Image (cartoon, coloured by chain):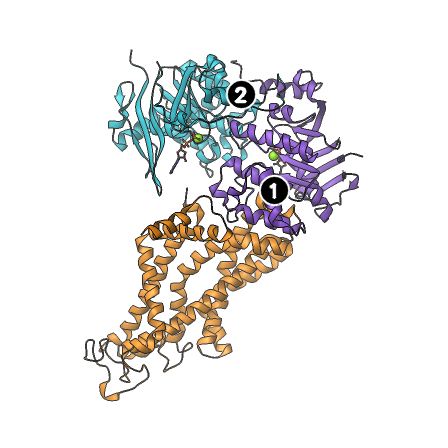
Chain colours: A orange, B cyan, C purple
Amino acid sequence: MTEMTGLRAWLLTDTPHSRGQARLANLYHGWLAFRRNPMAMFGLAILIALLAIAALAPWIAPHDPFYQDLTARLQPLGTPGHPLGTDSLGRDILSRLIYGSRITLYIVTLVALIAPLAGLIVGTVSGYLGGWVDLVLMRITDIFLAFPRLVLALAFVAALGAGIENAVLAIALTAWPPYARIARAETLTLRNADFISAVRLHGAGPIRIITRHIWPLCISSLIVRVTLDMAGIILAAAGLGFLGLGAQPPSPEWGAMISEGRRFILDHWWVATMPGLAIFTVSLAFNLLGDGLRDVLDPKGEK
Amino acid sequence: MTPLLEVEDLWVRFPTRTGILDAVRGVSFTLGRERLGIVGESGSGKSMTGRSILRLIRPPGQVTAAHIRLDGEDLMQKSEAQMRQVRGERISMVMQDPKFSLNPVMSVGDQLIEAWRVHKKGSRSEARERALGMLEAVSIRDPERVMRAHPHELSGGMGQRIMIAMMLIPDPELLIADEPTSALDVSVQAQVLQIMDRLVQDRGMGLIFISHDLNLVADFCDRVLIMYAGRVVETCEADKLHEAKHPYTRGLLNSLPRLDAPQKRLEVLRRDPSWAETPSVRPS
Amino acid sequence: MSALFFDDVSVWFGEGRDRVDAVRHANFRVGHGESFGLVGESGSGKSTIMRALTGLAPDWSGRMAVNGNPVRSGHRRDRNFYKSVQMVFQDPYASLHPRQSVDQVLSETLHLHGFRDIEPRIVRLLDDVGLGSAFRFRYPHQLSGGQRQRVAIARALAPEPSILLLDEPTSALDVSVQAEILNLLTDLRAEHKLTFLMVSHDLAVVAHMCERIAVMQAGEIVEVMGVDEMRALTPAHPYTRKLLQASLGYTRG
Ligand SMILES: Nc1ncnc2c1ncn2[C@@H]1O[C@H](COP(=O)(O)OP(=O)(O)O)[C@@H](O)[C@H]1O
Ligand SMILES: Nc1ncnc2c1ncn2[C@@H]1O[C@H](COP(=O)(O)OP(=O)(O)O)[C@@H](O)[C@H]1O
Ligand SMILES: [Mg+2]
Ligand SMILES: [Mg+2]
């Protein structure tokens, strides 16, 4: 117990004694602020559970997600051995959902890495350099923004071929422009700030200023935004899966599962509803998490 | 005769992660129809004192007081709806930066006219007449043009005069001015102060003048409260401020560079922890 | 040869109809080791002169020189320029990066100037500005306004400049803290033989810090006077008299 309080005091001190301590203390303060938001904690818990489920899928799934048993087709909820029932080919829905979480996480991670990074680079370069660079980059951004996201993604997938990787690429390509906008707007307010002028007076060049001084201040609002957008990304991936352009059967991707289930939606509602509920839960969790992160990361909310 | 304002044992508290922060600690004072200055360093609780009279402290901040009486009526007992009435009609407040107090997308004239009609329920043309009159009262030379202007087209001094005009429309009994001239150049500052001075005198209002500028308060006010760490450490007649006794007040006065007397080094304030602990003094 | 030399310097912002002539035909020179003040109302172009010199305001004409070396037109400056001229900004709440600790700020600055012995230099800089190592790993939000301004001064001193540009270094601070910072600047100037160019709207502060003072009005320097003239309230220009009168305090009209 005394050790705990010693650690707490070490983290909460106003006079850190090393770089590492200062960093950790900063993180700890953020965590303390985050912890005060119960809904955000709830969202975080769901996402941690999702991670655990994805990691442990082979051990916790009761059945092989691809094993077909045509004698046990379309079993209802609560069937012994199949708590969430089975689909039209007699595959266990629970096991498919559990394995599907891996695909969902895969999509989410890739999109969350590609889109904001692309947006960050385009937006900060455009905002900091200004002039014709800004003009060209922002017109390109406008062109991407002018297309409805799903239609553009459809066009990409049609051109690149169906499949998860291409779906991810298509979603990322359509998702970056809003991030570029946000990053540019933040950069415009930052580029004339005194602390940027000060590093310029020590001879720092544009690349250093953008990556070391502007990025750290843009990233927090991007993280918040990505988290809030995550629901949309999951839905877009599911939408592509639903249209048959994303994950291909027999892959247990949640959107594709809904698509398969829609043929029986009237008589066997659970086949489409269970993956729908999974998508809903994870999207909600990301939204809650995003709200909490905004409180912690967005300095405008404080003071 | 009852004084205009009596404040007794005023506390303002903010709960924080590390415990309760007392921003104002047991402040008491009374105010007649006079100019009372509140001075002190930033963070000493001046603004919180001013705002808590209007009960304008946002949660989680909490205000407690034995009483805050305006003409004998206790403001602490009033409901939020009754307070809104008090704020509009009997006590007005002018803030430091007019940019944040005026509506940026509405012309100055429309804002003045609307403010007048909210309080006086007159026709639009009458309101317009009165608004023009108000602008003349705060020494604006070209009121017709200023009526059409939007706040961002005005200089700081002009904006602050318009704020004062707006605050004076309902004929308040008490004006609270929180650093009204701190963002202005000295020459403009003098004009704004003159206007406030004249209006206070002509209308017999009370004025609470919050500032960090000791010399200004000494010249402008009748009486001064000096605040340190949420307490009133000293109170005196404004023209006797330069003879103040408390080491904190003396320290503040001595740390100012002077135009009339060269100094090699400036005196530095040595803070004594006991200043923050002795209870607030009570003006006689 | 003067430390700073300004000859017929004009600075403007924008083009065509939006053009603002912020400084017009400014002439003055600052000797080595001298402390020179610029006073005037807000918007009179005081900061703009400094920003043109340092390249933060790129549109200017005329001639400027630092220690006899002419300054290049536009906003480009070479490494030697930044080694001899540094600036302290007005608002210590805006001049430090909110996510960088004191240590990060100073070590990056030293790194940019090509120093190798960063560790001992940080310790020395912090001692120089009276902060000490206890503050080394703090973030700006853990510092008061005065402490922040000390960090900004340490950063400006990092390349061991000979000229310090001070843009209202104390106007955002309380008077008691102002006294500490002004004393610190006086000490540093004596210790490092610095030349100061200091902007302020507070005539008493400028009189305390500077030997010669230029008065600006609407982009023009209307008068350059010695501090004794100013203290004796005997300036030549009527605008200067008006400024001095106003700063003597409020008189009931
Ligand atoms: N929302 C808040 N939460 C916590 N503390 C606050 C809050 N607002 C103000 N304070 C504290 O109240 C004290 C007094 O503030 P204020 O009255 O604004 O000072 P000043 O004398 O500069 O006007 C300060 O120390 C400040 O830190
Ligand atoms: N980036 C800018 N763009 C356009 N106008 C500017 C800019 N910076 C300053 N100005 C104008 O230049 C004039 C002088 O400003 P400044 O040098 O900051 O005044 P001071 O420092 O004396 O208060 C002002 O009229 C101001 O509006
Ligand atoms: Mg205040
Ligand atoms: Mg300036």
Please give the residue where the numbered disc 1 appears in the rendered image. C124
Above or below, A118 relative to C50: below
Residue placed farthest to the front in the image? A2
Name the residue: 32% across, 19% down. Answer: B5
Asked if one can make out residue C34 in the rendered structure from this viewpoint, the answer is: yes
What is the tally of numbered marks visible in this picture?
2
Q: Tell me how far mark 2 sits from mark 1, CA to CA.
A: 31 Å
Q: Nearer the viewer, residue A162 or C66?
A: C66
Residue A103: x and y in percent read 39, 74
- Residue B254's tag is 2
Q: Is residue B151 left or right of residue B88?
A: right
Q: What is the chain letter for disc 2?
A: B
User: What is the quadrant of the C terminus of chain A in the image?
Assistant: top left
In this rendering, the answer to whether A249 lies above or below A172 is below
Disc 1 residue type?
Arg
Q: Is residue C66 above or below residue A212?
A: above
Q: Quadrant of residue C209?
A: top right
Horizontal and vertical percent for residue C215? 68, 26
As rendered, which of A82 and A75 lies closer to the eye? A82
Inspect this view and state whether residue B118 appears.
no
The residue drawn where x is 72% and y is 30% is C34
Position of residue A118 in the picture relative to residue B222 (left or right): right
Residue A73 in the image: state x and y as whole percent.
24, 84
